[in-house]
Image (tube, rainbow, N blue to C red):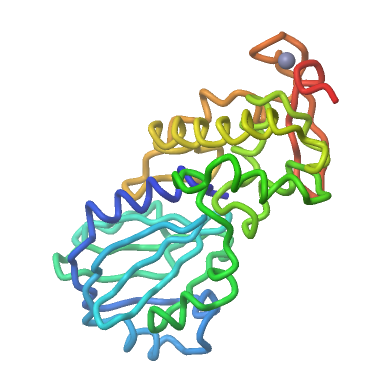
Amino acid sequence: MPELPEVQTIVDDLNRQVRGRRIVGIALDWPKMIQYPAINKRQFAVLTCGRKILRVERRGKYIKFYLSGNILMIIHPKMTGRFLLENGEKPETNYRHSHLKFYLDNSKILAFSDVRKLGKVWIGKIAEVENLANFKNLGPEPLNKSLNLSKFIKLIQFKKRKIKQLLMDQTVIAGIGNIYSDEALWLSKIYPLTLSQDLTKIQLKTLLRAIKSVLKKSLKLRGSSMRDYRDIVGNQGNYYEQRLVYHREGEPCLRCGTKIRRIKIGGRSAHYCPQCQYH
Ligand SMILES: [Zn+2]
């Protein structure tokens, strides 16, 4: 699933490519992706057509389209969702899973392709959508300067949960998933199943620094593409090739040479070095 660096890369590209464009038509063949409100395809068209895309923003793993007329449309790409800017004259055949398309006033098509159909859309007046529980309850942004050590300690230290799970909980911190939690824990030499309340202040300081640095590094490399993630012209991100521990099970630790292990944790996998991340 795309995490902060991948979603931010998409958002930056969208701002460069479709900001200021007007939506002149839509095609939607999977109306179930509309999570809120309960509307059909025609009503969705009424809400979007004729509106200008004023700007695109990211919050956590969500993509927010601010449209003219005070309308906010939020899209969550989930596992396999991707955007592609198609040239109207030559539709991209690779993207036959485009279940939602926006026809733009420059005759390009912004397509949302989603093989597994797990992507979700919310739309409505800005205040109304921002007040929905999904968005209102999101934790702070990890790259925001206001997320400093004292705030981070408050978020993490007194909770009695495994640190890996806590980092992936979007209501604690927004935008981190499986990849970057593994990477940040390896960088800070913390065992993924450590209970958050047992972490020292020094460990938390190291962890916060690791989170920020690994996210920034991936952002520079335009994210990580293991399977599905692509940017809006179909290119992969370059972080995956440079990953530290994620999906390196059985390979030598880049720090000490010990074989990387994988453990199951709440239905997800954590990758760690049993030597450096000793508990
Ligand atoms: Zn190691």
Left or right of 171 in this view: 61: left
Q: Nearer the viewer, residue 23 or 195?
A: 195
- Which x, y percent locates residue 188? 66, 26
- Which x, y percent locates residue 110? 30, 63
Q: Nearer the viewer, residue 55 or 263?
A: 55
Left or right of 165 in this view: 71: left
Q: Quadrant of residue 56?
A: bottom left
- Which x, y percent locates residue 224? 50, 37
Q: Nearer the viewer, residue 112 or 95?
A: 112
Residue 143 position (above or below residue 78): above
Name of the residue lying farthest toward the left: 106
Q: Nearer the viewer, residue 240 or 80?
A: 240
Residue 258 position (above or below residue 272): above
Quadrant of picture, ligand 1: top right
Number of numbered markers:
0
What residue is at 43 percent from the left and 79 percent from the top?
A: 123
- Which x, y percent locates residue 138? 57, 62
What residue is at 77 percent from the left and 49 percent from the top?
A: 158
Name of the residue lying farthest toward the top: 257
Left or right of 234 in this view: 181: right
What residue is at 61 percent from the left and 38 percent from the top?
A: 179
Residue 122 position (above or below residue 107): below
Q: Quadrant of residue 20?
A: bottom left
Quadrant in the picture for the C terminus:
top right
